[in-house]
Image: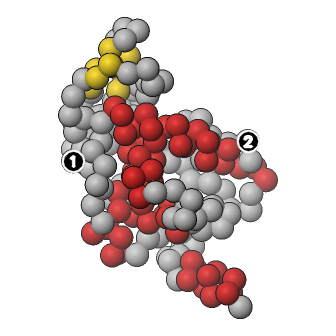
Amino acid sequence: MTFAVAMQAQNDNANSSGEWTAPKSADAKKNSMTYNVESVAAGQKLYSMLCVVCHGDKGKGDGISASALATKPSNLISSKVQRQSDGALFWKLSEGNPPMLSFKSALSEEQIWQIVNYVRSLDNSKAHSTAKATRTDKTKTEVGTTNPTHSKKVEKSVTTNAKPVKEGKKKSQ
């Protein structure tokens, strides 16, 4: 009976086209994690451990398990995902939607926000130009641009041993 209630709650968040949508109230939740090189790197580490198997290395929904799933993983770099508020992405990571797991009891809020920041860093389109961490030499990571869509700005340059977020090639229009 508990399973049926949980499934009904998740189905209540599907729109008429069957897409998984966060409740409008999720949009009000503000990202408490500063978008910077450190938070993106921490999010990338968590993503590599928990998300890559389904969503793939670049977030395109093409992970090694994706083809075996009845519900295909979202393409995280798509405008459909990137247009969602940080709060909506936080809610989805927290609540899950089978086959995607709920992470609210496995991860801290800080860790979920780090994954949200990493997902934002995957977007390389001009329309959603996110702040990018780019490697300029072996010890220095510089900060990229401001993201006008999500109002995130990387605050400083830092020296880090973390694997940098790779800047993708720009798409021709």
Q: Quadrant of residue 133?
A: top left
Between the residue at mark 2 and the residue at mark 1, the CA separation in whole angstroms equals 33 Å
Q: Identify which residue, 170 or 92, lies in the foreground.
A: 92
Q: Residue at x 37, y 11 (%)?
A: 139
Q: Residue furthest bottom?
A: 1
Q: Is 31 displayed left or right of 11 in the figure? A: left
Q: Residue at x 40, y 9 (%)?
A: 138
Q: Identify which residue, 136 or 110, lies in the foreground.
A: 110
Q: Identify which residue, 49 or 26, lies in the foreground.
A: 49
The numbered dot on residue 119 is none
Q: Position of residue 165 (x, y in %)?
A: 43, 28
The quarter of the rendered structure image containing the N terminus is bottom right
Q: Earlier in the sequence, mark 2 or mark 1?
A: 2
Q: Position of residue 32 (x, y in %)?
A: 28, 55
Q: Residue at x 39, y 52 (%)?
A: 110
Q: Identify which residue, 86 or 159, lies in the foreground.
A: 159
Residue with the mark numbered 1: 151
The quarter of the rendered structure image containing the C terminus is top left
Q: Is residue 152 above or below residue 80?
A: above
For disc 2, the neighbor class at 10 Å (few under 14, some 14 to 19, many from 20) is few
Residue with the mark numbered 2: 64
Label 1 residue SS: loop
Label 2 residue SS: loop
- Look at the numbered discs 2 and 1 and tell me whether their residues touch, using CB distance below 8 Å: no
**Residue 48 visible in the snapshot:** yes
For disc 1, the neighbor class at 10 Å (few under 14, some 14 to 19, many from 20) is few
**Residue 166 visible in the snapshot:** no
The kind of residue tagged 1 is Ser
